[in-house]
Amino acid sequence: MKTRAAVAFEAGKPLEVVELDLEGPKAGEVLVEVMATGICHTDAYTLSGKDPEGAFPAVLGHEGAGIVREVGPGVTDVAVGDHVIPLYTPECRTCEYCLNPKTNLCQRIRTTQGQGVMPDGTSRFSYKGEKILHYMGTSTFSNFTVLPEISLAKIRPDAPFEKVCYVGCGVTTGLGAVMFTAKAEPNCTAVVFGLGGIGLNVIQGLKLIGARQIVGVDLNPGKVEMAKRFGMTDFVNPKDHGENLVGHLVELTGGGADYSFECIGNVNVMRQALECCHKGWGTSVIIGVAPAGAEISTRPFQLVTGRNWRGSAFGGARGRTDVPGIVDMYMEGRIDIDSLITDVMPLEDINKGFDLMHEGKGVRSVVTY
Ligand code: NAD
Ligand code: DAO
Ligand code: ZN
């Protein structure tokens, strides 16, 4: 079949909207009509050419929602007509990782997904006879895409695609870092570094679990209003505190935060996030993706004296198990997604969505097909 797609032909160049050839699903695979997709920093990072795993030409996009249109042989867990969210972190439920409750990093298709191909080692996309690669196992910048069955979360049919696509990455990453990775408790104190599309979802996760104090840290005071609306209790601009930012945060939280979250991808901030945690028990969760090759540092005594450093991918969520519940939370009005989707555009304008992100305008742009 044919599908309209925004293709990354080369690193550092705008996406080109073209018509691709798409082969149907093979064994264990599913054809999905993508109805909406968010544009995330990770797509921009890969497009920039800085992602060591980035390969071209490829169909990027990993934050989508859509409808199952065809299933390949042996597919049992989804059926034609089901509404689904593609998962860049799959959940096979049988690999060593899925069987270990300490991780969500299913490894069933890790190697081929990283190479931009389906589990059988081939791509379903092509253009004028040349192979086009998949991306993160999802490729949601195509109106139709093929995914392994284990990379799909089935969701309720009344959820609006142009909102719940954001659950495919940003919402789950933020809420999950609080609920699944940190397992933060009611009445805790927390510091959130970076009040963008991820940090705001961390804040709403903290509010949801009943955190007592939620301190937001950002260089941009323009982020304050939205962050307050989501539950931030105190705002700190690093520019106002120079070298004493950590000391100020420790004082503000009465001895250090129970939890901190780095939602930027800056290794210097990661250090501040660890060091503003409470001696004896404070846990800092790294969510931001730092540039390739960057390294973190601190004095080991920070850890000897009881602070903990953690990392979180996709919020520690197991996609097929946890994502439907997060969609339910939105539909029940327990979390806000609408305010975070600040621009909606057709596929033809997808490069404008990337421009808005680079300019720091809005929170999330969504493409509807
Ligand atoms: P964003 O650009 O929307 O937000 C970043 C915020 O940080 C901005 O408000 C900016 O003003 C602020 N900021 C920048 N430098 C700062 C500094 N030195 N001190 C304080 N504030 C500063 O980005 P986002 O979409 O929220 O993504 C955040 C990070 O999370 C990115 O690195 C992204 O790649 C990563 N991410 C990780 C996962 C995961 O599973 N771990 C998933 C999605 C995204
Ligand atoms: O090595 O098992 C693995 C997969 C790691 C994927 C982690 C992805 C999280 C960070 C990227 C942000 C995605 C938008
Ligand atoms: Zn698995």
Image (spheres, grey):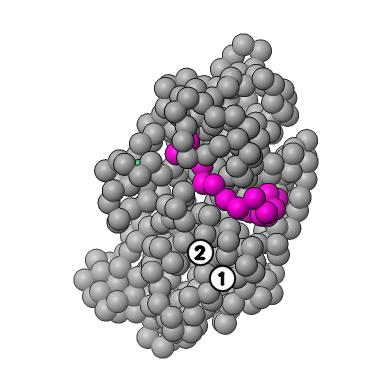
Amino acid found under the numbered disc labelled 2: Leu
Amino acid found under the numbered disc labelled 1: Gln
The residue positioned 40% from the left and 49% from the top of the image is: 294
Q: Quadrant of the C terminus?
A: top right
Closest to the observer, 245 or 14: 14
Q: Looking at the rendering, which quadrant does residue 347 occupy?
A: top right
Q: Quadrant of the N terminus?
A: top right
**Magenta-colored stretch includes residue 152:** yes
**Magenta-colored stretch includes residue 163:** yes
Residue range corresponding to the magenta coloring: 149-164
Mark 2 is surrounded, within 10 Å at the Cα level, by few (under 14), some (14 to 19) or many (20 or more) other residues, namely many
| Residue 314 % position (x, y) | 46, 53
| Residue 326 % position (x, y) | 54, 60
Mark 1 is surrounded, within 10 Å at the Cα level, by few (under 14), some (14 to 19) or many (20 or more) other residues, namely many
Residue 352 can be seen, yes or no: no
- Residue ranking furthest to the top: 129
Residue 294 can be seen, yes or no: yes
Q: Is residue 61 above or below residue 270?
A: above
Q: How many numbered discs?
A: 2
- Distance CA(mark 1)–CA(mark 2): 7 Å
Q: Which mark is residue 204?
A: 1
